[in-house]
Amino acid sequence: MLEIKDVHFHYGQAHVLQGVDLAIGDEPLALIGRNGMGKTTLCHSIMGMARISRGSIRFQGTEIQGRRPDHIARSGIALVPQGRRVFPSLTVDEHLRLVAKGRNRPWTIERVYETFPRLAERKRNGGAQLSGGEQQMLAIARALLTNPRLVIMDEPSEGLAPVIVDHLCIVLRDLAKSGMGILLVEQNLGVATTVCDRVAVMVTGRIAATMPSQDLLEDETAQRRWLGVSAHA
């Protein structure tokens, strides 16, 4: 579905992405790593929000490197950004109506409210009046209403209460079962391995390893080397 080959990105003199190679198919893939490893920069590069220095990014066989972000979004990729980025002055319902494309698509506003009942209860509340968990639901719902083929989620569990994280994992697994492609960018190893059966580890702008989630969960030495913490901790 998405093929990334030898992608480099420079920010001034800093070489942030150093030859990233990654392939994402129909199964969800988690991209994990510590802060500052280049995960968010890779997300922005895929979406055309950061212009790469060299390399190739192909979506469903078509080169998208160099395209405008809105063109990439219309091609079938949606980004749930780190920090949610909801509009404080818009209500939940107004957020959703901005991106809804009609009733003849798999994801509609009605389906969003069925999937996230809390959003239905808060539909007339502004973005600034929502809790962190509610804002994250809204950010995901906003992406789903574009009816994408692939969703990129950048740190969706960040700052959320454990009970909200549990619900988030259930929603993401259901999305994956429906056939939607998912690239889940996470620092939380538990969330990453609950949602995805495969993980890619990013270290200093490179993909250090790609492996089954269970293999990483059982290898505490690898967890300490790449993530600085074990799953048990």
Image (cartoon, rainbow, N blue to C red):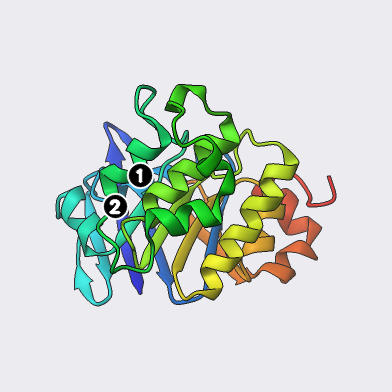
Identified by mark 2, the residue type is Ala
- Judge from the rendering whether residue 124 lies leftward or rightward of residue 220; answer left or right: left
Q: Position of residue 96 (x, y in %)?
A: 35, 44
Q: Position of residue 91 (x, y in %)?
A: 39, 30
Q: Of the numbered discs in the image, which one, if any, rests on residue 96?
A: 1
> Which residue is drawn at the image coordinates 25% and 57% (left, top)?
101
Asked if the residue under mark 2 is in contact with the one under mark 1, i.e. CB atoms within 8 Å, the reply is yes
Element carrying mark 2? loop
Q: Quadrant of residue 85?
A: top left
Q: Of the numbered discs in the image, which one, if any, rests on residue 6?
A: none
Q: Is residue 110 above or below residue 25?
A: above
Asked if residue 19 can be seen in this view, the reply is yes
Residue identified by numbered label 2: 100
Q: Is residue 66 above or below residue 173?
A: above
Identified by mark 1, the residue type is Leu
Badge 1: how crowded within 10 Å, few (<14), some, or many (20+)? Answer: many
> Which residue is drawn at the image coordinates 74% and 49% (left, top)?
224
The residues bearing labels 1 and 2 have C-alpha atoms spaced at a distance of 6 Å
- Judge from the rendering whether residue 184 lies leftward or rightward of residue 91; answer left or right: right
